[in-house]
Amino acid sequence: MVRAELLRLARAGAEARVAELQREIGSIYAAFPDLRRRRAPTQSGGRQTARKRRVWTAAERKAVAVRMRKYWAARKAAKR
């Protein structure tokens, strides 16, 4: 079998499967119409929102770096 023929048959099979799944989804939505409107539940039970990352200023980064240097120096001293 030629590669092009194999790809054509695989595509036809995939298209048939997609059509079958779409029919199944349609029957599920017909049985449970509220599924279209509902979002996935979250851990807290509230609405899902995108998490916003807080950006540190240069001063905050520097302060953390100073604290961490002090922390690691203390740990290194305690190890001796």
Image: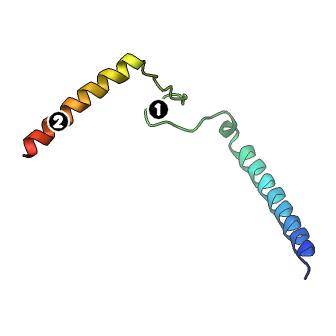
Which quadrant is home to the N terminus? bottom right
Secondary structure under the numbered disc 2 in the rendered image: helix
Hey, what amino acid is under mark 1? Gly
Hey, what amino acid is under mark 2? Ala
In this figure, what is the number of numbered marks?
2
Residue under pointer 2: 73
In the depicted view, which residue is nearer to us: 29 or 58? Answer: 58
Residue 50 image offset from top left, x and y in percent: 55, 29
Residue 17 image offset from top left, x and y in percent: 80, 62
* Residue at point 19%, 33% (across, down): 71
Task: Please state which of the two labelled residues, at mark 1 or mark 2, is closer to the viewer.
Answer: 2
Query: In the picture shown, does residue 37 fall above or below 3?
Result: above
Dot label at residue 74: none
Q: Left or right? Give the position of 54 relative to 74.
A: right
Query: In the picture shown, does residue 36 fall above or below 13?
Result: above
* Residue at point 92%, 72% (across, down): 4
In the depicted view, which residue is nearer to us: 14 or 80? Answer: 80
Identify the image quadrant of residue 61: top left
Q: Left or right? Give the position of 2 relative to 57.
A: right
Q: Left or right? Give the position of 5 relative to 63.
A: right
Residue under pointer 1: 45
In the depicted view, which residue is nearer to us: 59 or 4? Answer: 59
Identify the image quadrant of residue 37: top right
Q: Left or right? Give the position of 64 relative to 14.
A: left
Q: For the residues marked 1 and 2, what is the alpha-carbon distance in whole angstroms? A: 44 Å
Secondary structure under the numbered disc 1 in the rendered image: loop
Residue 22 image offset from top left, x and y in percent: 79, 52
Residue 20 image offset from top left, x and y in percent: 81, 59
Nearer-N-terminus badge (1/2): 1
